[in-house]
Image (cartoon, coloured by chain):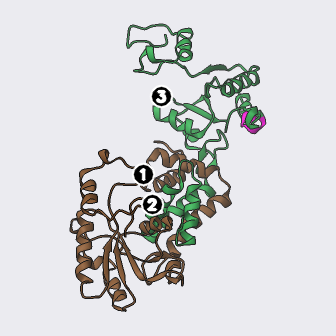
Chain colours: A brown, B green
Amino acid sequence: MNYSSRLLENAVNELARLPGIGRKTALRLALHLLRQDTQQVEAFSQAILVMRNDIKRCRNCHNISDNDICDICANPKRDLSIICVVQDIRDVMAIENTGQYNGLYHVLGGIISPMDGIGPEDLTIESLVVKVNEGNTREVIFALPTTIEGDTTNYYLSKKLAGFSVVLSAIARGIAIGDDIEYADEITLGRSIVNRIPFSSKGGTAKS
Amino acid sequence: MNYSSRLLENAVNELARLPGIGRKTALRLALHLLRQDTQQVEAFSQAILVMRNDIKRCRNCHNISDNDICDICANPKRDLSIICVVQDIRDVMAIENTGQYNGLYHVLGGIISPMDGIGPEDLTIESLVVKVNEGNTREVIFALPTTIEGDTTNYYLSKKLAGFSVVLSAIARGIAIGDDIEYADEITLGRSIVNRIPFSSKGGTAKS
């Protein structure tokens, strides 16, 4: 491809490094940015640079934050006795969006995966143990992926936390609301039978 | 959506302004950039800013360029007597990629479109007339879209250039190489019959 300009080519190269952006899309984006006001492009470029340079990790839960302690950990209305362990900050956002959880989080920053060279020491497991050791925690909820790596991490964490008087739980897996049983995969359907919950006549199924 | 960080939210907002990028994709891109080295993100942000601030328009053909005169206009091997009129710099790239054209270009910067408030004075038509008036031009090729606006612009240009001794031509429209005739749309098929060209037994159809 002949770009007529090395500056354009550089910008296309950089944009094409983004995941899911090919060279054609990168060119379209570069030409779009070229048509914008200088101020608009400055704001764009600045927002990304400032985000990369100034964003912090919460000292408590390792969620991303603008301060040393994130808004969730700093919120006095949250239940400090429950910690939900997630792989990634995106999982925090997803659970927050449900509006159903009022405890704290702990972002592991990944899961144990020997294939990818990620061991327990690469994750924030020690700081979780320290936090639980402080004695304010009543329950730790595992919300990790249902993969071999996720199960391995769950198992490792449960061993690490075995000495403490905390309840360990995992988020429920089962048929999604509105899904047909006949089309569900066998593993999910099997789990949802094994992990069945008491039926309540008020509002369908609910934990007693 | 709760982003935990205003800096992340700003970056997502800016990325989501790009065409074809929704908020979910913008978040994915922002988190990807967050995981990159500071240097890498600086290079990204810098490449876009420098492109926007330093890119120039060729004084001769209005193509984008790093210099006052673009590489195509400055190339002594190009045929200076043919000018191909296109709407946009992307059309220059597309034609250059064919490797079939050795003349110059003239980038109009749009086409006449009263509906969008674009009149002849918003385009680089005057500078095309000035260029043709210099007397070095033998042929002007119109390579504008086959829309009402494209046809209007072709007509307007042909009127403007009527007084000069230049050949006016338009790129051939017809059934694409390899396309089946039965699936071609009627307008394209109709045009390709009206604008049929002499058949040469050497290498299929070719202009005699």
Where is mark 2, residue-wise?
A203
A7 with respect to A203 (left or right): right
Is B125 magenta? The answer is yes
State the residue in front, B68 or A165.
A165
Where is mark 1, residue-wise?
A20
Label 1 neighbourhood size at 10 Å, few (<14), some (14-19), many (20+)? few
Reply above or below: B179 against A132. above
Q: Residue reaching furthest front? A: A201
Res B36 visible:
no
Question: In this picture, which residue range is highlighted in magenta?
Answer: B121-126
B202 with respect to B145 (left or right): left
State the CA–CA distance, disc 1 to disc 3: 32 Å
Counting residues from the N terminus, which is met first, the one under dot 1 or under dot 2? 1
Please tell me which residue is depicted at 30% across the width and 45% down the height of the picture: A182
Task: Report the disc number at residue B100.
Answer: 3
Q: Nearer the viewer, mark 1 or mark 2?
A: 2
Reply above or below: B34 against B109. below
The image shows residue A132 at horizontal and vertical percentages of 35, 87
Q: Can you say which quadrant of the picture contains the N terminus of chain B?
A: bottom right
- Residue B125 falls in which quadrant of the image? top right
Q: Quick check: marks 2 and 3 in contact, CB under 8 Å?
A: no
Label 3 neighbourhood size at 10 Å, few (<14), some (14-19), many (20+)? few
